[in-house]
Image: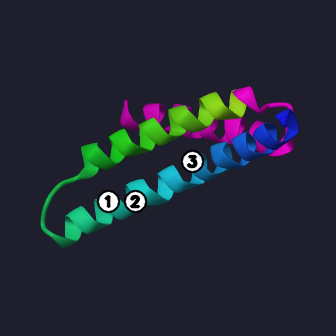
């Protein structure tokens, strides 16, 4: 049972990490198409997904996908904060 939970957690962490980027970009593009500025909302979505991916990746860091999700989401969060400032 624990092995099944670990596998789903690391896959979910990686999906949240990559999906957060795609959803944030999609929100920003759709906002631009409608003539609105949704950049801060897209950034909030991005940060929320990356924090969730980082937490789940840390929980499942014994698995390769969990470790990948934790490292990738950590790098993306740090890079986004550096880019904003």
55 or 21, nearer to the observer: 55
Label at residue 10: none
Look at the numbered disc 3 and give the secondary structure of its residue.
helix
Residue density around tag 2, few if under 14, some if 14–19, many if 20 or more, within 10 Å: some
Residue 34's spot in the image, x, y percent?
15, 69
Look at the numbered disc 1 and give the secondary structure of its residue.
helix
Residue that numbered label 3 is attached to: 16
Q: Which residues are magenta?
A: 59-85
Task: Tell whether label 2 touches label 1 (CB within 8 Å).
Answer: yes
Look at the numbered disc 2 and give the secondary structure of its residue.
helix
| First reached walking from the N terminus: tag 1 or tag 3 | 3
Using residue 72 as the reference point, say whether residue 23 is left or right of it: left
Residue that numbered label 1 is attached to: 27
Label at residue 25: 2
Is 64 included in the stretch rendered in magenta?
yes
Residue 83's spot in the image, x, y percent?
43, 38
Residue density around tag 3, few if under 14, some if 14–19, many if 20 or more, within 10 Å: many
Q: Quadrant of residue 85?
A: top left
Residue 36 vertical placement versus 13 (above, below): below
What residue sits 61% from the left and 39% below the top?
73
Is 46 included in the stretch rendered in magenta?
no
Query: Which quarter shows the N terminus?
Result: top right
| First reached walking from the N terminus: tag 2 or tag 3 | 3
Give the main secondary structure, helix, strand or loop, of the magenta stretch. Answer: helix
Using residue 65 as the reference point, say whether residue 75 is left or right of it: left
Residue 63's spot in the image, x, y percent?
85, 38
What residue sits 65% from the left and 47% below the top?
12
Residue 33's spot in the image, x, y percent?
21, 72
């Amino acid at each position: 049972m624990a092995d099944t939970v670990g596998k789903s957690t690391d896959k979910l962490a990686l999906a949240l990490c990559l999906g957060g980027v795609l959803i944030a970009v999609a929100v920003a593009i759709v906002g631009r198409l409608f003539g609105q500025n949704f950049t801060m909302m897209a950034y909030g979505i991005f940060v929320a997904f990356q924090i969730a991916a980082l937490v789940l990746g840390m929980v499942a860091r014994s698995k390769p996908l969990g470790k990948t999700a934790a490292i990738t989401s950590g790098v993306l969060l740090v890079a986004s904060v550096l880019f904003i400032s």
